[in-house]
Image (spheres, rainbow, N blue to C red):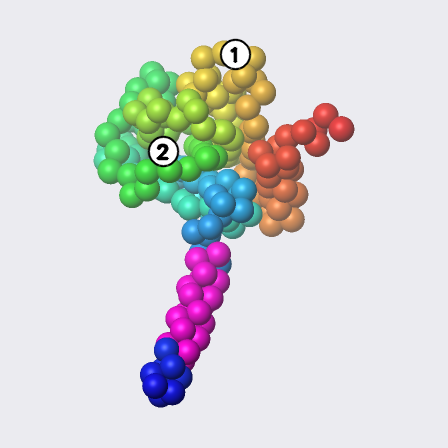
Amino acid sequence: MGRLKNSLLTGRRRFVKALAVFTAGCIASGVFAFAQGKPSVLVVYYSRDGHTQLVAEKLAEKFGADIERLIDKKKRTGPIGSTAAGKDAIARNTTKLEPLTLDPQKYDIILIGTPSWFSNVTPAVRTFVLENDISQKKIGVFGTAHLTGIESCLLQLSNLIVENKEDAEKMPKLALRHRDLEAEVLSEKIDAFYGQIMNPEEKND
């Protein structure tokens, strides 16, 4: 009888220890993030030359976010591809995307990034917004441009997401020129963007 009791106690201790290890792992991986009040974040972006990808990866690190790169099935590189890309952006055309690997509906906050093509949203990002109902999500937008056009591009993107022009203007935006991608400058701008998304009330303090 004593051996049985000792065996049960040993088994119980092992179970408690295993449960503690499992719980710690879940917390570390973010499984309990919702229960702790931490919103889940998804970074969705399109990048042709790598500039917007750099920003997306830095944002994912800052927000502890998952990341989804949009893959346009239409060739956008080379002289012919680049010309067609510009024409599609100006005409505000959509395109065909590779299937998403993540479900946007499972996230509380979605950050959407695009390069500016002639001051317009890329077809890939336009397609993502039009094909996915994200109207109930908290949204922030970001993008890159060589010199000019990124502000009007991001306003255009905001207007695609929300119908109210005032809401579109107020939507948090991270507008970057290529010169802003230097590490220290980018870090400061991302910190400010993080504050707009996560602590919007501080803006009015």
Q: Quadrant of residue 99?
A: top left
Q: Position of residue 202 (x, y in %)?
A: 70, 32
Q: Is residue 99 left or right of residue 26?
A: left
- The stretch of residues the image draws in magenta is 9-27
Q: Amino acid at mark 2?
A: Gln
Q: Quadrant of residue 136?
A: top left
Q: Position of residue 39 (x, y in %)?
A: 50, 40
Q: Is residue 73 left or right of residue 136?
A: left
Give the mark nearer the N terminus: 2 vs 1. Answer: 2
Reply yes or no: does residue 110 show up in magenta: no
Reply yes or no: does residue 12 show up in magenta: yes
The residues bearing labels 2 and 1 have C-alpha atoms spaced at a distance of 24 Å
Residue 165 tag number: 1
As drawn, 20 above or below 154? below
Q: Are marks 2 and 1 in contact (CB under 8 Å)?
A: no
Determine the secondary structure under disc 1: helix
Question: Which residue carries the number 2 mark?
Answer: 105
Q: Residue at x 65, y 48 (%)?
A: 184
